[in-house]
Amino acid sequence: MSDFYLLDPGTRQLVEGFLFHEAELLDAWRLDDWLALFDEEGRYQVPPTDKPEASHLDTLFIIADDYTRLRERIIRLKDPNCHAEFPPSRTRRLITNIRIDKPDGDVYGVRANFAVYRHRRDGDVRVFTGEYRHKLKFQERVLKRTLKIVERRAILDAHELGAMGAVSFIL
């Protein structure tokens, strides 16, 4: 974590809007559109609850997907034979306390707190809270600045997942 970094309001607005758009896509189960937000070298990770700072290279992660594995995960989640998520969970994401670190070249480190409310068909509601850590890369397009996800890490606050159940949806 770094000291407070003051950046221009336009960049802050773009980053915040990006995070809110990402949450909206996931809550609407628009997984292909969500995948399009990723750089082709992008990663989606959920580290173990007891080692949130660990590396996926030497620690067993709950999820450690590169772009190819993430695409395959989305194909499985959309399949009606995916019993863990059929019908799909209904989720509502709340994104708060967005902090943007000083950029490293064209990549910004972004942290935000989250609460994901997950509703299942059996009436069970579970709440997953934690911190998102994104690495977002700015890309200059014709007359437009866009962002791509280089890394998205969802760090859960829970000490263990046992009582919360499986994380079969995208956090």
Image: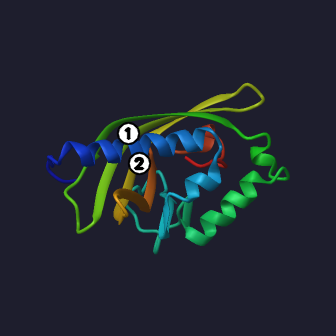
Circle 1 packing at 10 Å, graded few (<14), some (14-19), many (20+), is some
Colouring convention used in this rendered image of the protein: rainbow
Q: Secondary structure at mark 2?
A: strand
On the picture, is 119 further left or further right than 46? right
- Residue at image coords 48%, 42%: 21
Disc on res. 63: none
Nearer to the camera, 131 or 28: 28
Q: Residue 38 location, x and y as percent?
A: 49, 62
Disc on res. 132: 2
Number of numbered callouts drawn: 2
The kind of residue on which mark 1 rests is Asn
Distance from Cα at disc 2 to Cα at disc 1: 6 Å
The answer to whether 64 is drawn above or below residue 171 in the figure is below
Circles 2 and 1, Cβ within 8 Å, touching? The answer is yes
Disc on res. 113: 1
The kind of residue on which mark 2 rests is Tyr
